[in-house]
Structure formats: C-alpha cells, structure tokens
Amino acid sequence: MNKFRIRTTHLCEYTVFLYSIMVDTDERRRQFLKLSGALGAAGLTGLAGCSSGGGGDEAAANIGIVYATGGIGDGSFNDQAQTGIQRAADELDITYEESQTETNSDFQPTQRQYAQSGDFDLVACIGYAQADALSTNATEFPDQNWAIVDSVVDESNVASYGFREHEGSFLVGYMAGMLTTRDFSAGAGNTTADTNTVGFVGGTETPLIQKFQAGFEAGVHHHDDSIEVITSYVGSFNDPAAGQEQARSMYNNGADIVYHASGATGVGVFRAAQDMGKFAIGVDKDQSVTQESFANVILASMVKRVDTAVYTAVESVVNDNFQGGEQATFGLSDNGVEAVYGDQIGGQIPEDVKSSVADARDQIIAGDITVPSEPQ
C-alpha cells in the first residue's frame, strides 16, 4: 500500500488545532505549532497533501513532489509523474507528499516550503516551468537534494531529467502522414485521401514543446513532403475549451488527424475529433486508456516515461547514490519515449503502416534517421 495520505488545507489546520489543545504543556504546544506551521503553510500555495501516512521514521526516504500546473487528473504529464512516485512507494518503501499549484508563481514558495521543513530527502519538481524557481531555491538550500523533470538546472544539488520527445513524435507523425494520404476509418473517425492535412496543438510555445512539433512534422514529411501540417499554440496546459476550438478549426481546414502536446488542454482536442468524426493522437500516457471516453478517436499516443524519471530519481536517493549536477536524457533507445497504438482502435491500423513505423524506430536508434529537435 502507498504510504501516503491526502488531506486538504482545512483538514490540516483542523488536525493541528485538535492536537494543540491535547498536548499537556504550553511549551510542547508551541513546539508542535511551530513544526506544523512549516508544513501546513504550504496549503496557501496549493499543497494537496501535507502529511505522509504510515511508515514514518521507518521509511527508506521521504519525498516531496511538486506537479506542473494542470495538476493531477490531466490523464497525461502529471498523472505519469504520479505513477512514478506511486511505484516508488510500492517498491522502495518511501513516503511522499504531493503539491499542486495554480500558477507558475506558486512554484518557488511551494518548493521552498518543502526545503524549509528539513524533512525531505528529495524534492522532485515536475515540468520545465519550475526551472527558474528551482535555480533560486537550489542555491538557497544547498543541503537539499532536488530533481527536475523536463529541464536542466545546473546546480550541484539538482539531478536533471529530460527526454528526446522529438524521436517519439516522429513515429506518430510518420503514422499520421501515411494515414492522411489514404481512406481509412476506425471507431468514430476517418481519413480521406484527398485532404493530406494533419494538425499539431501545443500548450505553450517553448523550446520543449517545439520538440514535439519538430518531430511530428519531420515524421509526417518523411512519408510525403507535400502533406500540410497546421500548427497552433494555445498558451495553456489547462484550457480544454481552447484546445477544442483550435482542433475544430484544423479539422474544418481539412486535417484528418491532430496531435497534441498540451496537457489537460488536449481533452478539448479529443472532444473536437469525436464531434467531427476525425482522429487525434495523445501524449505522455496512453490516453486511449486515461481518457477512455475518447478511445474511439485516439489512434495512438506518444508516451513519455516521466514515471521512469521520477522513479529513477527516488531510487538514487534510497540507494544513497544520488548525483546532483548530473543530467539524464531518455529516448527511443532506452524506451524513454515510445509510440503506443490506441487501446480501442489501434488494432485496426493497417499492418503496413505499423511495420513502417517499426522500421523507422529502428533507423532512428541506429542513427540512420536524424530527427530535428527544432521546427524546420
């Protein structure tokens, strides 16, 4: 069982209150309130879990994890990170506490509260948007071990984990390119050979998300340079309505398939595909499973093993071989990214398409295909 217990800010405060009136001396009460204040205050910046559960002093390590905006339940990036910390709790006998933030400005104080408590063997920061805050906090708390996923913070107490998202995106782009040039139907979607157009919806237009775009476009054009790729950046990872609007526009302009790298915004892409009888491609997790109600239009997902990065970071702390200042990058060669066909309709994708995608994967790993990490 995971050694973790969620409690809301109000429940934290109520527990503190009850305990404070039960302790038997004023001095003990003051000491307890001082300690609880360091932890409970995190609720002011969006702390979702302010106390780890059973295990306590017997745990191999205590981990704090700060999720990207969009939070748990996005069926994508954050949920994949949570899978990693839950696996660590199951297999490595650790306890952990989770934080969800509303805006990027919450990252620095939330990270800081973990470090100030002195109770965490590692604080894992999920998402490139946390890099600036972590750069500051890592220098102010040099004895705290930190990890960041999706960015690099060049400090001696920070382990950085990244991915070759462009490699996995190439594979789903190659698939999309082959399917948009033929008549194909499955589930609730279809493609028509006379359109030869696909789309890409990004969250924010940053170098990281542009890697998804670059790989996708390269994969599409690896099949046929004449295929049009419509691109759009919504500006948010938590705006399904905007995602739906942008995807609908792409479908109206002839796109058969839209790939998204936009977190919870992607739910809107799936909804537009379903409404218009077209296809979509998910990201980070197998979204035909995490967003099951849209499985009849999700051809595939570009899975990014954020869970592996989180688990690896925790494991290094448990095994006492944490290496701050080091960078690790996961790609196709080590299954850090991969193309996974949809759970419901992936089996209907023609075998010649799948075989071509598998060959392209081997060629990328062998170095015979070079995938750009920036849009061309």
Image (spheres, rainbow, N blue to C red):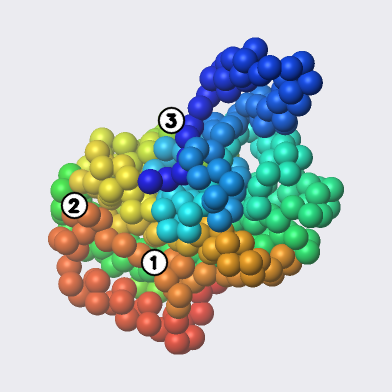
Q: Quadrant of the C terminus?
A: bottom right
Q: Do tag 1 and tag 2 residues touch (Cβ < 8 Å)?
A: no
Residue in front for this viewpoint, 81 or 349:
81
- Identified at 36% across, 78% down, the residue is 360
- Amino acid carrying mark 1 in the image: Glu
Residue in front for this viewpoint, 145 or 334:
145
> Viewed as shown, does residue 49 lie left or right of 286?
right
* Quadrant of res 352: bottom left
Q: Which x, y percent locates residue 29?
A: 72, 20
- Amino acid carrying mark 2 in the image: Gln
Q: Which one is closest to the eye, mark 3 or mark 1?
A: 1
For residue 338, which numbered disc appears in the image? Answer: 1
Q: Can residue 256 be seen in this view?
A: no
First in residue order: circle 1 vs circle 2? 1
Label 1 neighbour load within 10 Å: few <14, some 14-19, many 20+: many
Distance in Å between CA atoms under marks 1 and 2: 18 Å
Residue position marked by numbered label 3 in the rendering: 241
Q: Which x, y percent locates residue 232?
A: 50, 46
Residue position marked by numbered label 2 in the rendering: 344
First in residue order: circle 3 vs circle 1? 3
Helix, strand or loop status at disc 1:
strand
Distance in Å between CA atoms under marks 3 and 1: 28 Å
* Quadrant of res 313: bottom right
- Amino acid carrying mark 3 in the image: Ala
- Identified at 58% across, 62% down, the residue is 318
